[in-house]
Image (cartoon, helix red, strand yellow):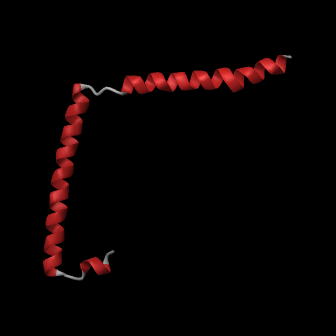
Amino acid sequence: MEYLIGILAVGVVAPIAIVMHYLTKWREMKTLSGDDERLLEDLWQTAQKLERRIETLETILDKEAPDWRDRHG
């Protein structure tokens, strides 16, 4: 009989408690703070700048070494 209580605790109660815990954590993290929004905006702008730089470098390489894509994947 004691093992039945242990099985119920591990098989039913523990998974429900774990799911509820992570649902609560997910709800807390769902909203962004002002600092987080600014950080994301800065990261987005940096990514855009890097993308433009890469495109510029690829254009230069296409003109100066047309077969660079074949040699480097």
Q: Is residue 15 left or right of residue 25?
A: right
Q: Position of residue 41 (x, y in %)?
A: 19, 39
Task: Compare residues 12 and 58 and report the one nearer the observer.
Answer: 12
How many numbered marks does the figure carry? 0
Quarter the C terminus occupies:
bottom left
- Going by the image, does 70 lie left or right of 60? right
Seen in the image, is 44 located left or right of residue 22? Answer: left
Q: Which residue is pictured at 39% across the width and 22% down the height?
A: 28
Residue at 18 percent across and 48 percent down: it is: 46
The answer to which quarter of the image holds residue 31 is top left
Q: Compared with residue 45, is residue 67 higher up or lower down, i.e. above or below?
A: below
- Asked which quadrant contains residue 35, the reply is top left
Q: Residue at x 52, y 22 (%)?
A: 21
Residue with the most extreme right position: 1
Where is residue 13 shown, x and y percent of the image? 66, 20
Q: Is residue 24 above or below residue 50?
A: above
Residue 49: x and y in percent read: 15, 53
Say whether residue 18 is left or right of residue 29: right
State the quadrant of the N terminus: top right
Above or below residue 57? Residue 70 is below
Q: Quadrant of residue 7?
A: top right
